[in-house]
Image: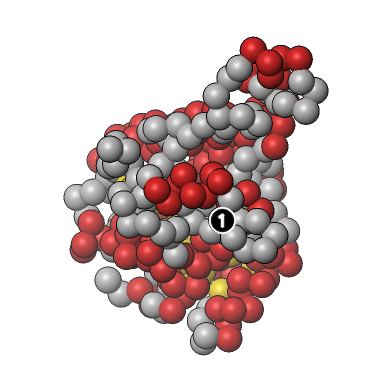
Amino acid sequence: MEWNKKVAVITGAGGTLLGGFARKLASKGTKVAVLSKELDHAQHTVDKIASDGGTAKAYACNVLNKENLTKVEQQIYKDFGQYHILINGAGGNMPKATTTNEIFTPEDLNDPKIRSFFDLDVSEIEKIFSLNFTSTLITTQIFAKRLLEVTETTIINFSSMSAQNPMTKVPCYSAAKAAVDNLTKWLAVHFAERGLRVNAIAPGFFLTNQNRNLLTNSDGSLTVRSHKIIEHTPMKRFGKVSDLFGTLLWLCDEKASGFVTGSIVGVDGGFQAYAGV
């Protein structure tokens, strides 16, 4: 693929994983529109790309505001012209939609320090679905119109291995990512005859700024939950951002994956394949 003739739009690119995606594509010669809710986060990614000799521009973007997304899309088209790759990476979880314990016990109901399933906050649940599912849908509505005007275009959504086998403690996040998987398949069918491919990457466990406090103690050692994760990962380690790059480039490359659409590609060190025994 002639990467230097491509333009990529990436939401959530102020973070560790999607920022890595932006840097990798830029290193291939692709021009990258880096979108993040906070402009300084997006600019941080752009600065790294620029220091590596790549081309990128930062945009502050609210992926839940259709009017804002429309203005950003128009500015990106003005700055770069036609774009070819859309990566819907914005997402996340909320503390009040997470249970304290993995397994319910009756004592949880009478302990004010415990957040049980029955204490999950409805407004936080709605935020999780908006941030992960609705943002993917709205962003695709705004950007897919131009993607459909040319050939060799692709959309990559950001899923999770928790979408197929929900993790304990995070029922709402898992359900929201399952919705992203379902939408990915629906969009793939809807746009197939127009040549726009839609797939998703489902990462396993990667240490990021967002989850570092959950997976490591203050001294850098692994938490109890992290030990369980590693024990259930046949490769016995967390993923590195670079572990995702091969799948990213493959799904972007029309020559390599031109007959691939509607797929959810797991990159999890064998986590989903392992039954635990």
Residue 142 seen in the figure: no
The foreground one among 4 and 81 is 4
Residue, far right? 112
- The residue shown at (41%, 59%) is 237
How far across and how far down the image is residue 35, in percent? 61, 59
Position of 250 with respect to 224 (left or right) is left
Classify 14 as above or below 70: below
- The residue shown at (72%, 26%) is 114
Residue 247 seen in the figure: yes
Position of 21 with respect to 216 (left or right) is left
The C terminus: image quadrant = top left
How far across and how far down the image is residue 252, in percent? 33, 60
- The residue shown at (29%, 41%) is 274
Q: Which residue is mark 1?
A: 222
Q: Residues within 10 Å of mark 1 (few under 14, many from 20)?
A: some
The foreground one among 81 and 7 is 7
Classify 12 as above or below 23: above
How far across and how far down the image is residue 231, in percent? 40, 48
Amino acid type at image mark 1: Leu
- The residue shown at (44%, 58%) is 238
The N terminus: image quadrant = bottom left
The foreground one among 61 and 235 is 235
How far across and how far down the image is residue 259, in percent? 19, 50
Classify 136 as above or below 77: above
Classify 23 as above or below 50: above
SS at mark 1? loop
